């Protein structure tokens, strides 16, 4: 079984897909070793480690090279977060999707947010884009490549439920394999989205929306934590650095090792 099929199967099993979000090779390897069955890259985390804010501010070549490094060194499927496609026209976005598929990932996240201004692409425009992406992937040998269509309705508009369902249905009809709705957190609204769309629903971890088993009971098929893990690691890194300079002591660096051997720390 190839990784694309493996990744698809993870969305249809009885158990929810708990996706680990990585931002570099080290984090990806740690997630794989911990037992995650698949990895999704986090564009926020990648941008942050390079000194940028999220929002397609880094060069696409730089972004896809990090995705390639991750995909080439882990044995589990990888889904790439490519934001809105890193392009202003359909042809460029389709090309970027194909180049991302070429590095060995099993799927992508692609969103309907505008990057140069606040707002969402029109449903018709984004649906057309998804159709072109699906057709190009199929023609170039990436049949069943997983398109996770992210809609930012809950992040950008008021009373977003009905538009979320409308967009989700249109995106699935246009070739999306799954629907990602960051910001969706109310149990009843989650149930309604699950009921109305005939595709796996992905939701994003938020304060108060954290329990994998509870989400599985609501019908969610995929749960990811986005940049929350990378943010946590960055805070820990800063705290440890401050502790080193404030205490002038390195002993806390060895607290997690029960029986450290000297050669483990030699450079």
Image (spheres, rainbow, N blue to C red):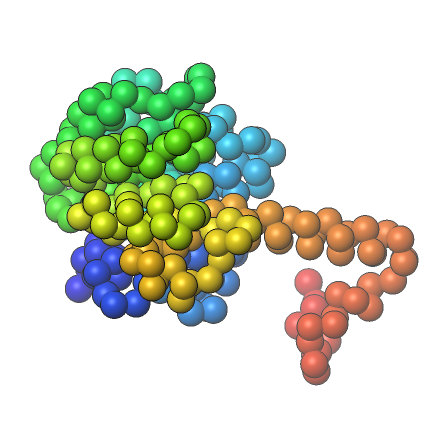
Q: In this view, does 250 lie to the left or right of 27?
A: right
| Residue 256: image location, x then y, percent | 69, 72
Question: Which residue: 36% across, 41% down?
Answer: 181
Q: Is the residue 212 above or below the residue 50 in the image?
A: below
Question: In front: 129, or 241?
Answer: 129
Res 61 seen here: no
- Position of the N terminus, as image quadrant, is bottom left
Res 255 seen here: yes
Question: Which residue: 76% across, 56% down?
Answer: 240
Q: In this view, does 182 lie to the left or right of 193?
A: right
Q: In this view, does 233 lie to the left or right of 217?
A: right
- Position of the C terminus, as image quadrant, is bottom right
Question: Which residue: 52% across, 46% down?
Answer: 227
| Residue 131: image location, x then y, percent | 15, 31
| Residue 66: image location, x then y, percent | 44, 43
| Residue 87: image location, x then y, percent | 34, 22
């Amino acid at each position: 079984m190839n990784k694309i099929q493996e990744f698809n199967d993870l969305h249809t099993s009885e158990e929810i897909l708990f996706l680990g979000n990585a931002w570099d090779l080290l984090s990806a390897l740690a997630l794989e070793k911990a037992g995650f069955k698949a990895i999704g890259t986090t564009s926020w985390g990648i941008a942050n480690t390079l000194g940028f804010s999220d929002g397609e501010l880094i060069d696409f070549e730089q972004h896809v090279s990090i995705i390639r490094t991750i995909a080439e060194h882990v044995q589990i499927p990888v889904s790439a977060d490519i934001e809105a496609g890193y392009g202003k026209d359909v042809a460029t976005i389709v090309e970027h999707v194909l180049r991302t598929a070429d590095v060995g990932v099993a799927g992508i996240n692609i969103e309907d947010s505008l990057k140069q201004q606040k707002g969402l692409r029109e449903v018709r425009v984004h649906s057309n884009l998804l159709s072109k992406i699906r057709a190009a992937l199929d023609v170039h040998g990436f049949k069943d490549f997983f398109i996770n269509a992210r809609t930012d309705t809950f992040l950008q508009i008021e009373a977003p439920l009905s538009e979320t369902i409308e967009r989700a249905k249109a995106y699935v009809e246009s070739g999306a394999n799954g629907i990602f709705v960051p910001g969706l957190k109310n149990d009843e609204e989650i149930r309604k989205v699950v009921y109305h769309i005939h595709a796996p629903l992905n939701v994003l971890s938020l304060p108060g929306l954290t329990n994998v088993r509870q989400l599985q009971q609501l019908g969610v098929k995929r749960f990811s934590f986005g940049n929350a893990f990378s943010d946590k690691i960055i805070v820990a890194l800063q705290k440890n650095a401050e502790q080193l300079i404030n205490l002038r002591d390195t002993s806390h660096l060895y607290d997690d090792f029960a029986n450290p051997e000297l050669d483990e720390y030699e450079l």
